[in-house]
Amino acid sequence: MTTPKKDSLYVQSVEKAFTVLAVFNAHQRALSLTDVAKLTGYSKSSAQRFCYTLVKLGYLKRSANHSDFELTAKTTEIGARFIESNSLVRRARPYLHSLSSKTDGATTLSILDGNEVIFVSRFLGKDVLDTTVTVGSRLPIYCTASGRAAASLLDDETLDQVLAAQSWEQRTAETQTDIEQVKQQILTCREQGYTLVKNQYVMADLSLAVPIYDAQSDLRGSINLAVTTANFDSDQLLEQYLNLLQSTTRAINS
Amino acid sequence: MTTPKKDSLYVQSVEKAFTVLAVFNAHQRALSLTDVAKLTGYSKSSAQRFCYTLVKLGYLKRSANHSDFELTAKTTEIGARFIESNSLVRRARPYLHSLSSKTDGATTLSILDGNEVIFVSRFLGKDVLDTTVTVGSRLPIYCTASGRAAASLLDDETLDQVLAAQSWEQRTAETQTDIEQVKQQILTCREQGYTLVKNQYVMADLSLAVPIYDAQSDLRGSINLAVTTANFDSDQLLEQYLNLLQSTTRAINS
DNA sequence: ATACAAGGTATTGCTATGCGATTCAAAGTA
DNA sequence: TACTTTGAATCGCATAGCAATACCTTGTAT
């Protein structure tokens, strides 16, 4: 933790603004000032100032009812700047798009952030029915191929910390919630260079992921190909696409 | 403009933090503290404070050289919350994905923001070669089908203001830079319900767009289908896909 | 219709947060 | 080595941000 002296550089108002933005989500699309104050824990007048400021800056707007606030499309620009500037993401995108066209599945580049992965690039092939997960979505590590593959790049100590911080929620009937079992899968991925995950995050998901490390931006992540159990079983997926996924990852890295 | 009294609610530090984030882009991936100070116009110690704060919040990180700062993947979360919460975007995504699969082109939902449009949803079909434009990208109105179609929903006064604010840069040899000419195209779109644009923003781009208005979030935008002039001419595109694009738009709106 | 509660809007005196100037340390260059 | 530039840290101060509050508007119950 930082020393008290160091935190004199920390601008608390900035934290508050981001906290306000973060209370808006899929389940809380439009929020009143009183909602915002309650959800953030800030006083009503603090909430008023930060909502007012964010409206002026264009990141929030008033709802049609003139009471509520909601996020604007301008919020997407902030992340777009990362997408457009990060060299790994830029290199990966054409390859991922090509791979999704070849396989008709969903291809994703994920990056580790704290105890989760963030999807930073995602292309959907013809067979994909689910459009809810998007660039910027955070997913857990313990029950996603993306998460496990990315985590295989961590040192043991960090891996243990990350696993200890997982929710271990039983998302499907088949979700593995034994920490040692999942850790073993991650260690296996570390050795064999890929991981295959089925029905762990959501039923019918069958995902194959390869870890990827980018030295320029010091990012640990993974390249993931997701298909549906309706079209593939595990052996088929490995046989048909493991080599392609690995060569794609090598091409992105060169 | 707001009165001086009203701006006592405005938190200037928040503006500064977003300004700092905004100086990072594809051409300025990694910036030193001195760079940030120069580009923002803030004092060196202000730049230091905001960079420090944004690093603590996770939106910036130190580059491998320990001097420069760069954006993190966490920035994408902010926009993801908009994507996941906005009802128009949510409704549109499955339809857009389906349309890109049927046409092999790129489908986009754009939303007006100031004098530009922002891409808030985008799916790439097999024929698409260009992966540089992403969710969160801003594009001008005067030379894009998305922009023109969305602008057709504006009242005349606002439309004139928006057109007056365009850069009118000659992006390709064929870019229309006569304001009256483009305005006429927009007014035609208003009447006929669609616009077709070719080689205006970038060579080989052939785009068909339909305006869309969402009453719930009071958003003006457009649904766009982009193909390449290598595969289609204008008449073909209209004949094959105009009806499909319009019925897709109606389905999204119901 | 009236009274009360809840939520939005605006104000204002106060203080602590953010500021800028500066110093010190580290790195780069000739 | 000397000088310049850049990064890191400090500190007194004043104004930016704060919290309390009053006022206004809307909604609800009797």
Image: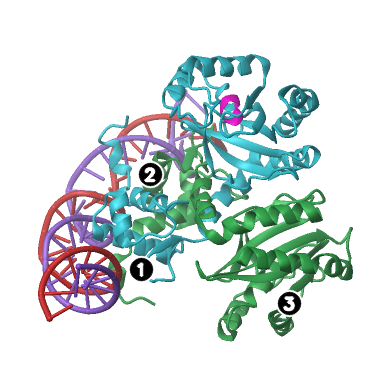
Chain colours: A green, B cyan, C purple, D red
Secondary structure under tag 2 reads: helix
Q: Position of residue A215 (x, y in %)?
A: 53, 71
Q: Examine the rendering and report whether any part of residue A167 can be seen.
A: no
Q: Residue at x 72, y 30 (%)?
A: B249
Of B23 and A205, the residue lying toward us: B23
Above or below, B150 relative to B119: above
Which quadrant would residue A105 be assigned to in this image?
Answer: bottom right
Which quadrant would residue B191 be assigned to in this image?
Answer: top right
Q: Which segment did they paint magenta?
A: B145-149
Pinpoint the chain carrying mark 3: A
For the residues labelled 3 and 2, the Cα–Cα distance comes to 43 Å
Residue B152 located left or right of residue B158: right
Specify whether residue A140 is painted magenta.
Answer: no
**Label 1 CA crowd tier, 10 Å (few <14, some 14–19, many 20+):** few
Pinpoint the chain carrying mark 1: B
Amino acid type assigned to the residue bearing label 2 in the image: Thr
C-beta proximity under 8 Å, tags 3 and 1: no
Q: Residue at x 66, y 32 (%)?
A: B224
Find residue A177 and name its label. Answer: 3
**Label 2 CA crowd tier, 10 Å (few <14, some 14–19, many 20+):** many
The mark closer to the camera, 2 or 1, is 1
Q: Residue at x 71, y 85 (%)?
A: A180
Of B201 and A210, the residue lying toward us: B201
The mark closer to the camera, 3 or 1, is 1
Which quadrant would residue B226 be assigned to in this image?
Answer: top right
Residue position for label 2: A53
Secondary structure under tag 1 reads: loop
Find residue B67 and name its label. Answer: 1
Of A247 and A238, the residue lying toward us: A247
Amino acid type assigned to the residue bearing label 3 in the image: Thr
